[in-house]
Amino acid sequence: MQKIVTFLWFNDQAKEAVDLYVSLFENAKIINTSYLTESVAKAAGKKPG
């Protein structure tokens, strides 16, 4: 069986989207999660997190 490796990027509601994605695929797992730091979020005009 072929292995699928994904990279997901969301502007908002990322946790909810990833939780749904993981629930749909057998043996799916979250390996790494990155969040905007306060300084990067401020520079980008976004909320941190």
Image (tube, grey):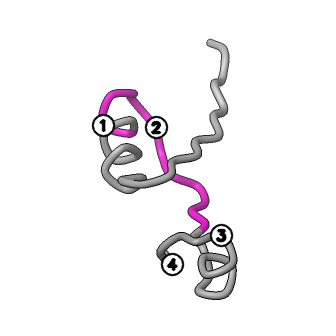
Callout in the foreground (4, 3):
3
Q: How far separated are the C-alphas under marks 1 and 2?
A: 8 Å
What is the residue that sits farthest to the top in this orientation? Answer: 1
In the rendered image, residue 48, in percent from the top left (x then y), is placed at 51, 78
Residue under label 2, please give it. Answer: 28
Picture quadrant of residue 12: bottom left
Callout in the foreground (2, 4):
4
Picture quadrant of residue 23: top left
Q: Amino acid at mark 4?
A: Pro
Q: Amino acid at mark 3?
A: Ala
Query: Magenta span covers which residues?
Result: 22-34
Q: Which mark is residue 48?
A: 4
Q: Secondary structure at mark 4?
A: loop
Q: Nearer the viewer, residue 5 or 48?
A: 48
Residue at the (65%, 70%) spot, across then down: 44
Q: Amino acid at mark 2?
A: Ala
Q: How far separated are the C-alphas under marks 1 and 4?
A: 26 Å
Task: Identify the mark nearer the N-term, 1 or 3.
Answer: 1
Q: Secondary structure at mark 1?
A: helix
Say few, some or many: other residues with alpha carbon within 10 Å of mark 2 (under 14 / 14 to 19 / 20 or more). few
Task: Identify the mark nearer the N-term, 1 or 4.
Answer: 1
Residue under label 1, please give it. Answer: 23
In the rendered image, residue 7, in percent from the top left (x then y), is placed at 65, 40
